[in-house]
Amino acid sequence: MPDRRFFPEEIFAIVECDGCGLGFVNPRPSILEIQKYYPPEYFQQPVTKSHEHYLRRRFAEEAKYLREMEDGVGRGRFIDVGCANGDFPRFMAARGWTVEGVEISESSQRIQDFRVPYPGSSRKLR
């Protein structure tokens, strides 16, 4: 799904690593380019019913990609790298998943309701 709020006309190619299955944007934006896509306003989501509906629909679509990782009863474990304010990990935690998230942006809200390893942490994820 494109970012209909900030960049509705831009579509990014997502490719999958043949070795491990990791999906990523290709070509990858440079550090300077990526900043354009995450302005401070990105982290200040509007509290409207239509935006909440959009997020629920978006997260449900994203969750479909994780089904093969479930443990047989609809649960699994994952880490969201670049989790913004933590909304998607919260969505998955509400469905029984064990989640962790990492966000380095100074503009994001502080995440306190699930485990977040800090940048540079040597703690191993369980």
Image (cartoon, rainbow, N blue to C red):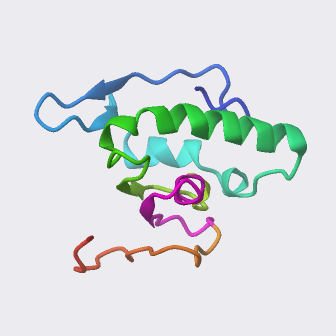
Q: How many marks?
A: 0
Percent across and percent down for residue 52 are 79, 44
User: Does residue 95 appear anywhere in the picture?
Assistant: yes
Q: Residue at x 22, y 75 (%)?
A: 124
Q: Residue at x 47, y 32 (%)?
A: 64
Pick whichever, 13 or 71, lies toward us: 71
Left or right, residue 8 beside residue 36: right
Percent across and percent down for residue 120 are 29, 76
The quarter of the image holding the C terminus is bottom left
The part of the chain drawn in magenta is 89-108
Residue most extreme to the front: 73
Pick whichever, 124 or 102, lies toward us: 124
Q: Residue at x 61, y 65 (%)?
A: 108
**For residue 1: magenta?**
no
Give above or below for 25 relative to 37: above
Residue most extreme to the left: 19
Residue most extreme to the right: 48
